[in-house]
Amino acid sequence: MSGIRFCDECQNILHPEEEKNEHRLLFVCKSCDYREYIQDTTSMEENKIYQRDFVQSFAESFIDPDYCLDPSMPREKIICPLCRHTESAYLIDKEPGDKFLRKIYICGKVNKNGRPDCRNIFSPIKYLKIVSRGETFAYREYGTADEVLVMLHGNLTSSYIFERTFAKLSEGFKVIAPDFRGFGLSSYANKLRSFDDLADDIQAFMKELKIQKFILLGWDLGAAVALKYAINYPADIEKLVLVNPVGLDGKTYVRDSEDLTPLPEWPGEAELIAKDERCGQFMDALNDRKKDFFKTYFIDEIFTKRTPENDRLDSYIENFTCQRNFPEILACLADYDISETGTGDIYKIQNQTLILSGKDDYKTPSKDALLIHKAIGGNASLKIFEDGGHVLMEDCMDEFIETVAEFCFNDQMEEEEQQDQIEEETNE
């Protein structure tokens, strides 16, 4: 870490500054014109001025590890990152001034005397500042497996939409679920112009994490971003999973009696959309955090097949109503068209792709999933869940996880079967 430095000319203390054009660290003297640049721009330690590690939140610092012994505490099958124990108790935490609810876990491992053995207190929510994008991204990380699964959420949600799946998926994957900029706990310093911006954000995010290859899963609007990523950065993706995907032309639907009616076209510019009466209702509800408004909306439009119990639905609403980019997202949807009559970019997809849809999905109907499957061709497979709606992770969680895992590990299982067959023939 760069310590205190003194001016070679007048021996006064040098002050750190940023060379904004080149994003380089330099030290300047306030008494004369002396300037000193850091020479090794690749060294993290040389370019670090000050580091403060936030290990625990205010609430975490007051949690007693003995809480894990309380039989009334809720528990989850989640792996402790310190000792690898597979079950932890948890509390719900909300920091002062924070709009976001999160879980704080207490490792459930006990010793032979029945006392807490590991005593680790942890939360899967992390933050990563990407200087090149000018944003700080919140993300959830579960598991330590070699295979990395990146999960992208949809509109009017956050990474919390996948919350029920993390425990089981982390048994076979290292799961990373970021909040897009302007959603959840991520910052929103730069306004969105297109889904390419979100794809570029994720590319920079994964590069910062030094993860070169991964499986990319997108739900709802996140599927459109996943497709944009596959178009722009195909070499990064091992496999692609599209869940309840937005159609190739960006249209979404509402249920009108038994028919599906496309939502009216939005004007293309975010500034015009913000003035639209329909958009204004959502923006007012987001700004004022009107829970009753969103409870009605989620039950009627999103959780149409199975409604989460009240406590969990309230948690969803708490997490989802942090969105700050609603008009911009609608403008991105209005501008999104990778179909044959649009940019035609859907035909660039070469990655192995799994498309999952719900038979009773009225928001992004299965007919759009069929069109995506047809356009990608031989590299794509499609499964329509007979008992699924718009949120397959909620409607058919076990079948959803099993289907994703089977697709992701299919090649590996085939290789293992071939290897076992070779060994059997050799032994004979």
Image (cartoon, rainbow, N blue to C red):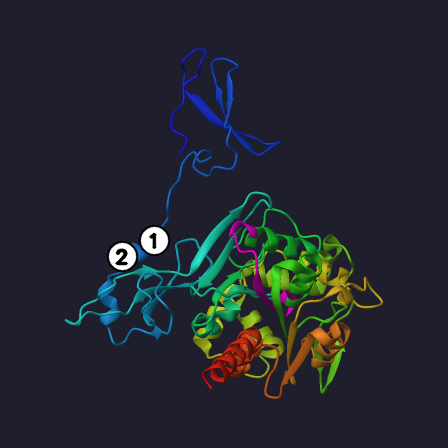
Q: Residues within 10 Å of mark 2 (few under 14, many from 20)?
A: few
Q: Please give the label number shown on residue 223.
A: none
Q: Residues within 10 Å of mark 1 (few under 14, many from 20)?
A: few
- Element type where label 1 sits in the image: loop
Q: Earlier in the sequence, mark 2 or mark 1?
A: 1
Q: Position of residue 77 (x, y in %)?
A: 37, 74
Quadrant of the frame with the N terminus: top left
Q: Amino acid at mark 1?
A: Gln
Give the left or right position of residue 339, taking residue 109 as reference. right
| Residue 201 or residue 419, whichever sits in front | 419
Q: Residue furthest left?
A: 113
196 within the magenta span: no
> To which residue does mark 2 refer?
62
Q: Please give the label number shown on residue 56.
A: 1
Q: Which residue corresponds to the image point at 51% horizontal and 77% vertical from the top-left? A: 419
Let me know if residue 307 appears in the view. Answer: no
Q: Residue furthest right?
A: 341
Q: Which residue corresponds to the image point at 47% horizontal and 52% vertical from the top-left? A: 127
Q: Position of residue 325 (x, y in %)?
A: 63, 56
- Element type where label 2 sits in the image: helix
Tell which tag, 2 or 1, sits nearer the viewer.
1
Q: Which residue corresponds to the image point at 51% horizontal and 70% vertical from the top-left? A: 162
Give the left or right position of residue 217, taking residue 49 as reference. right
| Residue 109 or residue 253, whichever sits in front | 109
Magenta extent: 207-222
